[in-house]
């Protein structure tokens, strides 16, 4: 359940997480904030560990009071391999007050890229990071690139 205003940019192995593989995006990520008034600002390492990567960042001073979501979560719900491609279906849920307010399905196809994307670039980028982490831990036929 990453913060909906977090824009992950690169893998981070410097965090102090006890179980990085259990993080919402499948590992730690570093990135910048997209909250109004803080666009492009780099949160501290501590903030990225305690808020950005985890969502429900009530202690974050940058979190706007009026927001559609508190956190975003992802799960792989299906994958299939064909003769020419490998397809992965993800489900996402955007939550507010620990309840889903938006959910849907995203689809990635090896060779074609993202065939069903989220319209919010932040959620889409988180999905790409989640899928990259997931693919690194699971047996998946060779895939060139997760990012669109």
Image (spheres, rainbow, N blue to C red):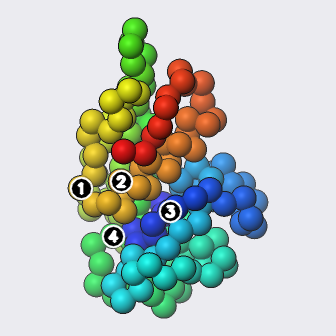
**Mark earlier in primary sequence (3, 4):** 3
Left or right, residue 50 beside residue 144: right
Q: Which residue is mark 4?
A: 69
Position of residue 56 measured from the top left corner of the image (x, y, whole percent): 47, 73
**Mark earlier in primary sequence (2, 3):** 3
* Element at label 4: loop
Q: Which residue is mark 3?
A: 8
Q: Gap in Å between the C-alphas at discs 3 and 1?
A: 17 Å
The answer to whether any part of residue 65 appears in the image is yes
Q: Nearer the viewer, mark 4 or mark 2?
A: 2
User: Given the current orientation, which residue lies at the most extreme top position?
Assistant: 83
Question: Which quadrant, please, contains the C terminus?
Answer: top left
Position of residue 87 measured from the top left corner of the image (x, y, whole percent): 38, 26
Q: Gap in Å between the C-alphas at discs 3 and 4?
A: 17 Å
Position of residue 146 measured from the top left corner of the image (x, y, whole percent): 45, 40
* Element at label 1: loop
Q: Gap in Å between the C-alphas at discs 4 and 1?
A: 15 Å
Q: Which residue is mark 1?
A: 119
């Amino acid at each position: 359940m990453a913060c909906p205003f977090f824009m992950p940019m690169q893998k981070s192995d410097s965090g102090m997480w006890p179980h990085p593989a259990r993080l919402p995006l499948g590992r730690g990520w570093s990135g910048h904030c997209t909250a109004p008034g803080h666009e492009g600002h780099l949160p501290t390492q501590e903030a990225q560990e305690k808020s950005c990567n985890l969502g429900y960042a009530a202690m974050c001073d940058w979190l706007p009071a009026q927001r559609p979501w508190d956190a975003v979560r992802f799960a792989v719900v299906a994958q299939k391999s064909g003769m020419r491609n490998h397809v992965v279906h993800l489900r996402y849920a955007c939550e507010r007050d620990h309840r889903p307010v938006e959910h849907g399905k995203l689809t990635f196809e090896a060779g074609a890229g993202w065939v069903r994307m989220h319209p919010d670039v932040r959620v889409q980028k988180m999905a790409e990071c989640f899928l990259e982490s997931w693919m690194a831990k699971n047996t998946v036929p060779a895939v060139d690139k997760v990012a669109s």
